[in-house]
Amino acid sequence: MTDDLPPLLLGRLNHVGIACPSIDDTIAMYARLFGATVSTPPFDLPAQGVRVAFIDVANSQLELIEPLGPDSPIHGFLKKNPAGGQHHVCFEVADIIAARDAMRARGATVLGSGEPRIGAHGVPIIFVHPRDTGGVLIELMATPDHY
Amino acid sequence: MTDDLPPLLLGRLNHVGIACPSIDDTIAMYARLFGATVSTPPFDLPAQGVRVAFIDVANSQLELIEPLGPDSPIHGFLKKNPAGGQHHVCFEVADIIAARDAMRARGATVLGSGEPRIGAHGVPIIFVHPRDTGGVLIELMATPDHY
């Protein structure tokens, strides 16, 4: 590695985001196949255009997301992947504004206006454009005070 | 949830598998953007048709996989996703044979012969067909003795 490697920005892998045509069907599948139950039942997050539920595993979470409304950002993904699939990976960061500024300073594109929005965990989040991150949509979220 | 919910089969989210056209470029990107370095440098896993490297985060790992050889199972994914992307999610299970049998008993398809193979962590693994799991390719691996 080079001498100018920046300090480690990524904290915990908070969750894997999974897009579903039906969040209820996906919850039923995880229960039936894996005995896994939701820790947070489905709720609407209109600001993000998604309906969301969480399944906890020992060290992380699965975030199930279903389109909410005609302008949901998930429609495009489901058009390409009608059965659903892995949509994003979310890492915690100590300082969301510093992380946003670091992404830009290092040449990556932050989606939207770049102003952090409040995500499903109630803390500010940003998304980094997948063209800058090897095709993986990466969410960065402020480390929650509690889970 | 129903009374006949099976016991929880999923353990830790061991890693997120990320397919890359160039594992070296992806490693360089994680270093440059996020200050993240490889914990296991790239090595060939001919039995799986992949070249593999790991990046550790606080609670989990990213498994970077690049096609190895003309028959690599990753070629199809990269044809559909030329920039790379999230390829699979891997959960630890206490007993890989019991997990394999449970998948079949519950109507899910285990890829290949169904005989567990030795994966990049040196422990037996299976893959469950994404048509049974909401479009997400799920790897199940025997819980490693150590990391």
Image (cartoon, coloured by chain):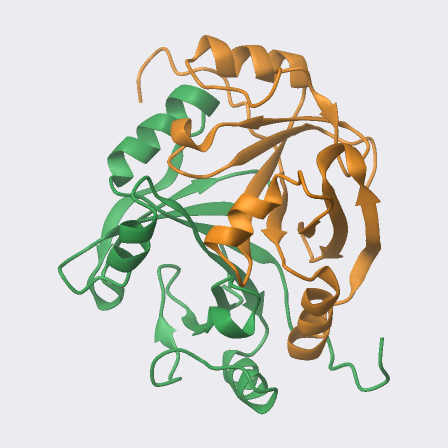
Chain colours: A orange, B green
Using the image as rendered, state which of residue B19 and residue B24 is in the foreground.
B19
Quarter of the picture containing the N terminus of chain B is bottom right
Relative vertical location of residue A76 with respect to residue A111 in this rendering, above or below: below
Q: Is residue B128 left or right of residue B105?
A: left
What residue is shown at x 56% (from left), y 41% (from top)?
A89
Farthest residue to the left: give it.
B70
Number of marks in the rendered image: 0
Residue drawn at x 27%, y 52% is B79
Residue B26 visible (yes or no): yes
Q: Residue at x 31, y 17 (%)?
A: A2
Q: Nearer the viewer, residue A90 or A135?
A: A135
Residue A143 sits in which quadrant?
top right
- Relative to A5, does residue A16 appear above or below in the rendering? below
Q: Along the horizontal axis of the image, is A12 left or right of B109?
A: right
Q: Is residue B58 above or below residue B14?
A: above
Task: Return the residue found at the far bottom.
Answer: B105
Residue B50 rendering spot, x and y as whole percentages: 25, 57
> From what the image shows, is residue B40 above or below residue B15?
above
Regarding residue B59, the answer to whether it shows in the image is no
Residue A95 rendering spot, x and y as whole percentages: 67, 17
The percent coordinates of residue A49 (x first, y second) are: 72, 39
**Residue closest to the far front:** A70
At horizontal 64% and vertical 68% (from top left) the residue drawn is: B10
- Displayed quadrant of residue A114: top right
**Quadrant assignment, res A57:** bottom right
**Residue B52 percent location from the top left of the image:** 30, 50
